[in-house]
Amino acid sequence: MFHFDDMPVIYPVGEHSFREVRQKGCVYVDKTIYVARMITQAKFIFLSRPRRFGKSLMLSTVEYYFRGEKELFEGTWLGGHEKEWKQYPVLRFDMTETEAITASQLSEFLHAQLGNYERLYGVEDNSRWNDIAFRYNSLIRNIYQVTGRQVVILIDEYDKGLLESLDAAQEEQDAMTTLLRAFYSQPKAATEAVKFCLVTGVARFGHLTLFSGPNNYLDISMNPMYAAICGITQQELIDYFQEGINALSQNRGVSHDDMIEALRVKYDSYRFTQGPELVYNPFSLLCAFSELSLDNFWIKSGTSKVFVKYLTRSEFDLMELEKLWVTRDRMESKYSKEDSIPLLFQTGYLTIKDVMEAKLYRLGIPNGEVRSALVEQLMPKYMGISEDVFSLLMTQLLADLKKGNVEAWVEDIKSLISRIPNQIFGPIESHLADEAKRAKVKEDNIARFERTYHIIIHMICQMIKVEAQSEVAFSGGRADMVIETKKFVYVIEYKLDSPASEALRQIDEKGYLLPWHADDRKVYKIGISFSSNDRNITEMKFE
């Protein structure tokens, strides 16, 4: 039998058990200081983070601390500071363990869990009671009475049942909410018998008792003290993953520093608080080291069901993803068809980019992995085509650019844009009766249209993994876009409601081609004209 000590570096990809991580000798980024911080700050804690960000591992770390398993914490911050190591009874409810989609199914699951704990701790069997709240409350109090120790309660992915019922009839949604409100309120109701309670999830539902009323849980999700409780900081990357960085850099034939920069661009820049701390997506980072690849691991591991349900039918504005200022209340509000921003932020597709003193937050796309995912997942749905067809179109676009087939590339772009519904470009001013309002909307739309075209084409270029820059500064001005491949350079200028010939003339007059005069590659200048009426490309010229 081999020993884990004889194995090379082990990365805990998808591992949720603190015990397994420690006993297998996996790379472990020490987050135990946050355990001490939580348990000394409040009795009832709530933490929200996107899926696969390490919430379950943190919950498991708390569990084994309260179980008093001192040996698992050797070499950690908590292992060096805790002196008593008391054991407490622990109730852990992992809501991902059930596929229940109705309140009755979830009630059956929860009753089964409560029955298991009644037998484990040798307390009264209350299976005769259908009231989930009464049985749960009795369990907590009875364990406290029998053991003489307060109970630790851990609830993982509390919102799963709520998310599963979002598309159900209102009656079923109300039943699910009533059930979970009753269940989640019991630790507070039995507070004298509770030592500590930690609840994790992705979504925030303000209408639940859990997050309302005078006895609110302490929500640490946007507290700067917990900015790095889940995720990997830049310093942690340097301290814990040198072997992985070296292996990746050797495999890809780049320098150590270039590899760190590539990882940063691909997986970093999640920010969950008003503080400056940024973190990497831990799942993607561990996968990258494990597989020696910079793939879109987080996205490929599964898309949030609620993301698909809501975003594909919401009144979504692509322009908002580039520079969006919102209040904290909006970021934390319930998902709705009318406002997809809470969904995008809470599920990790948007993150905090900047904070104003007035507590306004600017949101943006975190990194390259998420930007690719937004194109890959959103664009096919808006266009009404399958992801397979979309992937084929992306392949054709890449082939066109590599071969210098400019006309075919523009036609493919035109075909893609024609499939996008008009609401992504904003309101149509002709529907307005007031002439002044109509003129104002038209003026706003002109700027909006042009910017939207830029974003769509830029995101498509990123999706097909070609080097593309928007608004490239030159001594004579700014080119709208520059795309580079191994054999070709494309300098592109867009015009809205103007001839494509004007775009070519601007490229010449402002000297946009000068940087490539000594370049061995073939350089194209491309003028593309968009129409605010047709909402598509109407003319293209190139030389």
Image: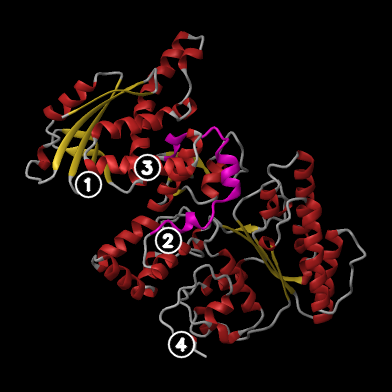
- Label number found at residue 394: 3
Residue type at mark 3 is Met
Secondary structure beneath label 1: loop
Residue type at mark 2 is Tyr
Residue 418 spot, x, y in % from top left: 41, 27
Secondary structure beneath label 3: helix
Cα–Cα gap, marks 2 and 1: 29 Å
Residue type at mark 1 is Thr
Which quadrant of the figure contains the C terminus?
A: top left
Where 243 falls versus 314 (above or below)?
below
Residue at label 1? 485
Residue 112 spot, x, y in % from top left: 80, 66
Question: Which is more toward the observer, 505 or 1?
Answer: 1
Range drawn in magenta: 295-321
- Point out the tag, 4 or 1, that comes first from the N-terminus: 4
- Point out the tag, 2 or 3, that comes first from the N-terminus: 2
Residue 237 spot, x, y in % from top left: 38, 69
Q: Does the image show residue 362?
A: no
Residue at label 4? 5
